[in-house]
């Protein structure tokens, strides 16, 4: 099975959902999750995705421009973002 990398933010969202889940029905009681926690996690997720997407767009610009040095630097930044943001690699269980 292919490895699935889970970001800290996604793990924290899953924990919040689990803590507020009716384990009989499997339904998440979203109204019981503190709104500040949801707002914080959603904002962090947005910033992570935006930074990742911006780097990917820049990599296409660098590739099109034929600037392999710039492209290499952008790819390093993408890998750094992935390495810094991932707390655990493994199969989702």
Image (cartoon, helix red, strand yellow):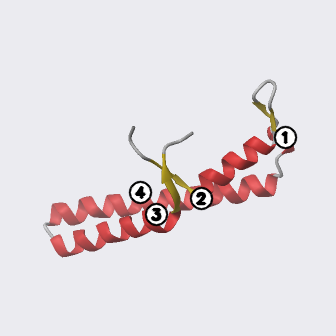
Residue drawn at x 64%, y 58% is: 43
1 relative position to 41: left or right: left
Determine contact: label 3, label 4, CB under 8 Å: yes
Q: Secondary structure at mark 2?
A: helix
- Image quadrant in which the N terminus is located: top left
Mark 1 closeness class: few <14, some 14–19, many ≥20 residues within 10 Å: few
Q: Which residue is mark 2?
A: 8
Q: Earlier in the sequence, mark 4 or mark 1?
A: 1
Q: Secondary structure at mark 1?
A: helix
Residue 51 badge: 3
The mark closer to the camera, 2 or 3, is 2
Which residue is pictured at 25% across the width and 58% down the height? 60
Q: Residues within 10 Å of mark 2 (few under 14, many from 20)?
A: some
User: Which residue position holds label 1?
Assistant: 31
Sequence-wise first label, 3 or 1: 1
Distance in Å between CA atoms under marks 2 and 3:
16 Å
Is 66 left, or right, of 25 in this rendering? left
The residue located at (22%, 66%) in the rendering is 62
3D distance between C-alphas at marks 1 and 2: 23 Å
In-front residue for pair 54/68: 68
Chain-order first, disc 1 or disc 2: 2
Residue 61 position within the rendered picture, expressed as x and y whole percent measured from the top left = 24, 62
Residue 92, percent across and down? 53, 41
Measured in 3D between alpha carbons, the distance from the residue under mark 3 to the one under mark 1, in whole angstroms, is 30 Å
Q: Earlier in the sequence, mark 2 or mark 4?
A: 2
Label 4 CA crowd tier, 10 Å (few <14, some 14–19, many 20+): few
Number of labels in the image equals 4
Residue 53: mark: 4
Tell us which disc is closer to us: 1 or 2: 2
Is 82 situated left or right of 35 in this image? left
């Amino acid at each position: 099975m292919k490895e699935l990398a889970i970001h800290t933010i996604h793990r924290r969202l899953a924990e919040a959902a689990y803590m507020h889940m009716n384990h009989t029905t499997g339904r998440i009681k979203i109204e019981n999750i503190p709104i500040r926690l949801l707002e914080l996690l959603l904002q962090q997720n947005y910033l992570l995705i935006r930074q990742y997407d911006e780097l990917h767009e820049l990599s296409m610009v660098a590739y099109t421009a034929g600037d392999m040095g710039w492209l290499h630097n952008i790819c390093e930044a993408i890998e750094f973002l992935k390495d810094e943001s991932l707390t655990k690699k493994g199969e989702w269980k």
